Amino acid sequence: MPLFMDRHDLPSVTAEDVAHAHARDLAVQGKHGVNFRTYWFDARTCCAFCLVEAPDAETAVKVHAEAHGLAPGEIIEVDAAMVEAFMGRINDPAGAAQGDAPIRESAHRVIMFTDIVNSTDMTARLGDVRAMDMVRAHDSLVRRALAAHGGREVKHLGDGMMAAFADAGAAIACAIAIQRAIAGFNEASSDPLYLRIGLHCGEPVHDNNDLFGAVVQLAARICDDAAIEAIVISEDLRALVERDFPVTALGRRMLKGFKQPMALFSVAWRA
């Protein structure tokens, strides 16, 4: 399928505005048979560039019109190798801004899990193709948030993702950005996508660029226990971030695989 790049002149917009528009594009692209690969935003000149696979330029512009009404000033067919040479990546980033350097054993990290709620029911309801579009939208929005907040994608879980952060505040900010991006996606999509996110911190064991141990297991269980659209964190992590982020105590909860109840806290993310 041909690859197109378009240019939008967007005076007075912010990077968050552009990210929100990209989420809307992802929400409706499946209906038109296009694939928005990534975008770039130059805050200095207020110009955004979108890279999209589409049957033709007119279809790509039509998706923009339906998603948010921001028509490009120009659109041209491009060669993937040429774009990569001049602009860098041609997909939403698969890892953190600092790359995929291994996390050193015994280093303190925040572990985050995302989980698409009722993914099996979603596939049964929407069909394989549309359900895969929804997973791709999740992947794109999560990976962009990871790149913006210094997170590293550890592995994809099929209906969610595991990531690691060196900074506790950045981890919480990333989780908030993800839930807000998903909310923006849902505003434009006829098929809503809902996530739960769980986070815990400690010193995981590193092996072959993967992370293991009780820290990882507890983060996963916290995610499993979280309510729809919630960001839930452990008491250890709450102690590091409560001055900067509003949290609400959820009480002590029994989590699978752990003998003692764990104090959990939810993080407010709606603006």
Image (tube, rainbow, N blue to C red):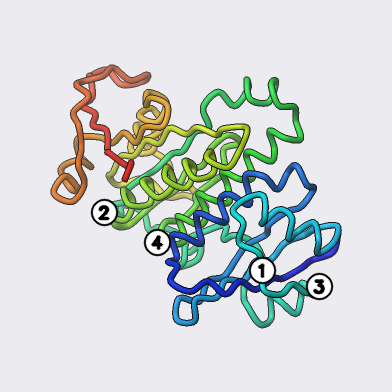
Report x, y in % for residue 206: 42, 50
The amino acid type, in three-letter code, at marker 3 is Glu
* Gap in angstroms between the C-alphas marked 2 and 4: 11 Å
Local secondary structure at mark 1: loop
Tell me the quarter of the picture where residue 94 sits.
bottom right
Q: Is residue 125 left or right of residue 188?
A: right
Q: Nearer the viewer, residue 2 or 212?
A: 2
Tell me the tag on residue 169. Answer: 2
Quarter of the view holding residue 43:
bottom left
Relative vertical location of residue 172 with respect to residue 259 in this rendering, above or below: below
Residue 66 horizontal/vertical position (percent): 67, 49
Disc 4 target residue:
150
Q: Secondary structure at mark 2?
A: helix
Residue tagged by mark 3? Answer: 77
Q: Earlier in the sequence, mark 3 or mark 1?
A: 1
Query: Which tag, 2 or 3, sits closer to the chain's start?
Result: 3
Residue drawn 51% across and 42% down? 161
